[in-house]
């Protein structure tokens, strides 16, 4: 089947990478010794002059090399693969509050951090709370597998970037995997333009408990939007759950389009994969790069823990933006 010219053509776009064709040096970036020295100096300054996390401002510390590193990471996030791994931050040298401070300063160099939870948390811990995945429970609180997805796809303004800092890995599993939603779009454009057209129309999504009394539990957004640039709102769980919650049939062309996209999103041959180690700093462009992980099993004495920030320079800093 020939490609449909109605939709954007990403066949030559470097952001539309496919699996093993993405070289490791495109996404893995070494953290230079000079950056580590700058962070050590910032930590010493914070210890002498303590400030609450939210008042830490990178402009008040000597972070020139860190600024250049994060600037290059942002370039790769916006014009390249959409995923970057900074290797690495020496988290073992500092206390947990100082590690959070370093993570915050580097995150602020990337883009403005924004609230991640309905109750106003701006820095969250990604770890298994023992609660099984179900409607109303967000995946980062569980050890359940998560196919590549967009964070907060059901919100008015999802974050533009998602950053994660590993403090402790799982005993087994927890492998990170990524996919280009531009590459998925390109496959659909060539193979199933009829179903791609449906993905540009609204789908129900469940809001995972993040709404006030009297507000609807579901929203409706298209999976793909092409203006001013491509943005994706795909999540394997919240879309089918949205139809259950809304009491609407998930059938016909709607279901066929979702399942065609899901088959590609869950195709491991399209993935970039790595297992995060302590001190590794992962950033993903949440507009066009999907991220997920395999299921994992914790060591009860030292469970898997990651710190997470969401970043968005538009709208308000509040949860709904």
Image (cartoon, grey):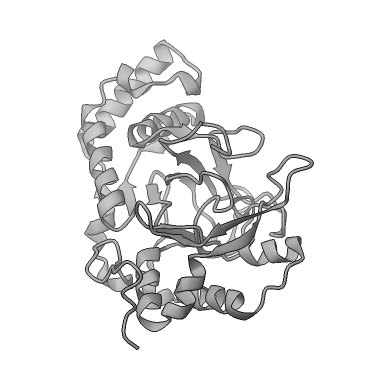
Q: Is residue 290 left or right of residue 219?
A: left
Residue 250: x %, y % from top left = 67, 73
Residue 168: x %, y % from top left = 50, 47
**Quarter of the image where one finds residue 6:** bottom left
**Quarter of the image where one finds residue 92:** top left
Residue 106: x %, y % from top left = 36, 33
Q: Looking at the image, is 166 positioned above or below residue 33? A: below
Residue for point 72% across, 60% down: 134
Front in this rendered view, residue 160 or 71: 160
Q: Looking at the image, is 57 positioned above or below residue 318? A: above
Q: Is residue 225 left or right of residue 170?
A: left
Residue 315: x %, y % from top left = 47, 34
Residue for point 28% across, 56% down: 27
Q: Is residue 320 left or right of residue 137?
A: left
Residue for point 24% across, 64% down: 13
Front in this rendered view, residue 304 or 77: 77
Q: Looking at the image, is 302 positioned above or below residue 38? A: below
Residue for point 22% across, 39% down: 32
Q: Quadrant of the N terminus?
A: bottom left
**Quarter of the image where one finds residue 196:** bottom left
Q: Looking at the image, is 6 positioned above or below residue 222? A: below
Front in this rendered view, residue 37 or 249: 249
């Amino acid at each position: 089947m020939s490609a449909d010219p109605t939709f954007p053509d990403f066949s030559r776009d470097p952001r539309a990478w496919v699996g093993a064709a993405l070289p490791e040096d495109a996404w893995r970036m070494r953290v230079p010794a000079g950056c580590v020295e700058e962070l050590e100096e910032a930590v010493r300054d914070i210890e002498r002059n303590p400030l609450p996390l939210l008042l830490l401002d990178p402009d008040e510390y000597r972070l020139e090399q860190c600024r250049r590193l994060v600037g290059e990471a942002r370039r790769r996030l916006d014009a390249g693969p959409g995923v970057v791994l900074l290797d690495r931050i020496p988290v073992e040298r500092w206390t947990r509050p100082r590690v959070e401070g370093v993570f915050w300063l580097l995150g602020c160099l990337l883009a403005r951090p924004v609230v991640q939870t309905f109750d106003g948390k701006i820095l969250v811990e990604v770890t298994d709370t023992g609660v099984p995945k179900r409607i109303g429970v967000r995946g980062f609180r569980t050890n359940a597998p998560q196919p590549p997805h967009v964070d907060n796809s059901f919100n008015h303004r999802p974050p533009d970037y998602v950053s994660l800092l590993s403090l402790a890995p799982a005993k087994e599993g927890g492998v990170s995997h990524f996919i280009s939603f531009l590459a998925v779009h390109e496959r659909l454009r060539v193979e199933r333009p009829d179903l791609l057209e449906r993905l540009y129309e609204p789908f129900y999504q469940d809001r995972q408990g993040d709404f006030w009394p009297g507000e609807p539990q579901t929203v409706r957004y298209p999976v793909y939007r092409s203006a001013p640039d491509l943005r994706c709102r795909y999540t394997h769980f919240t879309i089918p759950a949205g139809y259950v919650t809304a009491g609407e049939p998930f059938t016909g062309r709607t279901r066929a389009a979702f399942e065609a996209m899901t088959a590609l999103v869950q195709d491991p041959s399209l993935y970039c994969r790595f297992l995060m180690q302590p001190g590794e700093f992962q950033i993903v462009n949440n507009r066009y790069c999907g991220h997920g992980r395999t299921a994992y099993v914790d060591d009860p004495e030292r469970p898997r823990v990651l710190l997470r920030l969401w970043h968005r320079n538009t709208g308000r800093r509040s949860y709904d933006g």
